[in-house]
Amino acid sequence: MPILISDTPPDVPLSEVVDVLPTAWGQPSMTWTGWTGETFNLAGDFKAATLMEAEGRSGLVMPPIEHYSVRAATSDGETWQGYNVLPRDVTWPIIIVGDSPQAMREEHRRFLATMRPDQTGTLDVYAPDGEKRSLTLRYMAGAEGDFGTTTYGGYWLRHSIKMRAYDPFFYGDPITQPFAYAPGVNFYGGGTGTTAPLFYISSSRTVDSAQITNPGDADVYGVWRIYGPFTSATVGFGSSTIVLPFTISAPHWVEVNTDRRVATIVDDLGANRWADAGTVKFAPLPAGATTTLAVTIAGAGTGTAVEFSFRPKFWRAW
């Protein structure tokens, strides 16, 4: 997918220079945000100065898969044991053009400055319906040579940039399921003209549940955040049960990250609360399924709230 990067288009229509399908034809658009924070638009219409060719791109659909199996002398064939999604390699053939050699070199410098082998950037892919999926990439190779020409009256430079996603999944935008404490209702009314004192019915133990759907292609671990006040909290779903038998006052909170690569229980002051926890069982949210989340709070009050959030993981950019 050659990418054309320039502030000034060449002298001929870009549709005659590269094979481009505009986003108006139902094609996804893409942006690259480097480690510097600078963003480049990698897809647009025929009049744009930053274009991506329809042909030649790679690494945006299914990731590489490695299967595991065992073989026994007493049986034919092999028994499948599972699979692993391997790091994903992405190739970007790019074209950098300017209306002068100086402009071309400046664009070249600015674009390559966003790539370093010890830093990562993000490729964001936007579907025509607005859905966004993001892939974290690290520069590998491809910008070693200098391939400048003066074709079509502009100044061109071509590279075939090779990137690697060590986490091979495209991630969607975060999905959050909130739970909020509702204070009790006025039992006697307590309005003008009433003689009874104000009295509110409010259980000291609040139980709530909600369903949440993981639209992704892979199971994913989420993050629980529980806002005080509470004297104990239990959150989870299925086999995942997390008991927090300690007090958090308002407006503080405690966060449980169930990702096995993180696996932390910390509060808003940065304290590690793992030793204070009770039962802790982490489980992923199943892919393509709807799951019932359960929350039990003791000592809830005004300000008590619970959030469960996750980012769905996809095999493909679209």
Image (cartoon, rainbow, N blue to C red):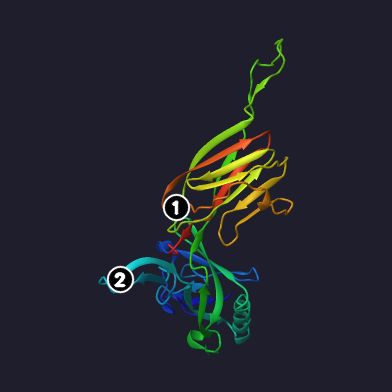
Residue 299 coordinates in the image, percent (x, y): 67, 34
Position of 13 compared to 186: left or right?
Answer: left
Is residue 155 visible in the rendered structure shown here? no
Position of 299 compared to 86: left or right?
Answer: right
User: Mark 2 to mark 1: distance in Å?
Assistant: 28 Å
Q: Is 28 in front, or is 141?
A: 141
From the viewer's perspective, is residue 177 above or below residue 77?
Answer: above
Residue 225 coordinates in the image, percent (x, y): 62, 47
Residue at left offset 59%, top offset 83%: 104
Q: Residue furthest front?
A: 74
SS of the residue under disc 2: loop
Quarter location, residue 205:
top right
Q: Is 223 in front, or is 37?
A: 223
Which residue carries the number 1 mark?
A: 286
Position of 138 compared to 67: left or right?
Answer: right
Q: Is 136 in front, or is 211?
A: 211
> Of the residues shown, which amino acid type is indicated by label 2?
Glu
Which residue carries the number 2 mark?
A: 78
Question: Image quadrant for the N terminus?
Answer: bottom left
Position of 291 compared to 191: left or right?
Answer: left
Q: Residues within 10 Å of mark 2 (few under 14, many from 20)?
A: few
Is residue 69 visible in the rendered structure shown here? yes
Q: Residues within 10 Å of mark 1 (few under 14, many from 20)?
A: some
SS of the residue under disc 1: loop
> Of the residues shown, which amino acid type is indicated by label 1?
Pro
Residue at left offset 62%, top offset 74%: 119
From the viewer's perspective, is residue 71 above or below residue 97?
Answer: above
Quarter location, residue 245:
top right
Question: Image quadrant for the C terminus?
Answer: bottom left
